[in-house]
Amino acid sequence: MTIKANGDSGVKIAADMTLDWHDWADLSAAQLYELLQFRQAIFVVEQGSPYADLDGRDARAQHLLLRRGEQLIGCLRLIGPDPLVRIGRVAVKAGERGRGLARMMMEAALQRAAEVYPHRDVALSAQTYLAPFYQSFGFVISSTPYDDYGVPHIDMIGPARGV
């Protein structure tokens, strides 16, 4: 599904941007390489965290890709219930941060979760400094801080939503 500028999704985006939902199996080899390279550049290289990005969850996730023109500038994944719905790998390109793009992607993800998995709580693992950002969506902290490959994290749970 493509959401173009201020499309029917209810999520407001700029005219030169698109948000696209993809199932893993529908990603081309080039898109898959681009997505994994993008995540590696942010989570492994920029943040200096040699974590195991390939965790076996991507194949059952829906992937939201944010583009400005043809350039990938943001992504996240939405994983179906097991037992909770999970949002993860939320990332925005360094030069694009501070413009509300992560908020826009989270709004799209929560809307999608409500449509596809109605009335199911949503969980995520957040870098501790981002707790206030996720709390602004109704998430609450559900764990004590822990080290995730050198980056302090906390678990958070968001309330179920339905359409």
Image (tube, grey):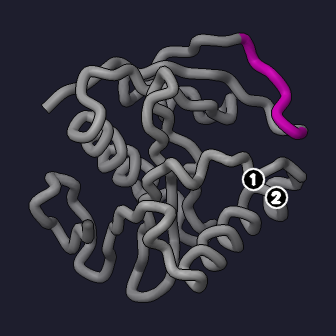
Question: The C terminus is located in which quarter?
Answer: top left
* Residue at image coords 54%, 79%: 31
Q: Is residue 135 magenta?
A: no
Q: Which residue is mark 1?
A: 53
Q: Which residue is mark 2?
A: 44
Give left or right: position of 16 versus 9.
right
Give left or right: position of 7 versus 19.
left
Q: Residues within 10 Å of mark 2 (few under 14, many from 20)?
A: some
Q: Is residue 26 above or below residue 99?
A: below
Is label 2 in a helix, a strand or a loop? helix
Q: Where in the figure is residue 63, as x and y percent of width and height?
A: 46, 58
Q: Is residue 142 above or below residue 50?
A: above
* Residue at image coords 30%, 82%: 16
Give left or right: position of 131 versus 4.
right
* Residue at image coords 26%, 66%: 1
Q: Quadrant of residue 106?
A: top left
Q: Where in the figure is residue 42, as x and y percent of width and height?
A: 72, 62
Nearer to us of marks 2 and 1 is 1
- Does label 2 or label 1 sit earlier along the sequence? 2
Query: Is label 2 in contact with label 1 (beta carbons under 8 Å)?
Result: yes
Residue type at mark 2 is Val
Is label 1 in a helix, a strand or a loop? loop
Magenta segment range? 144-149
Q: Between residues 60 and 96, which one lies in front from this camera angle?
A: 60
Q: Between marks 2 and 1, how big is the CA–CA gap?
A: 9 Å
Q: Where in the figure is residue 155, as x and y percent of width and height?
A: 62, 22
Q: Between residues 42 and 54, which one lies in front from this camera angle?
A: 54
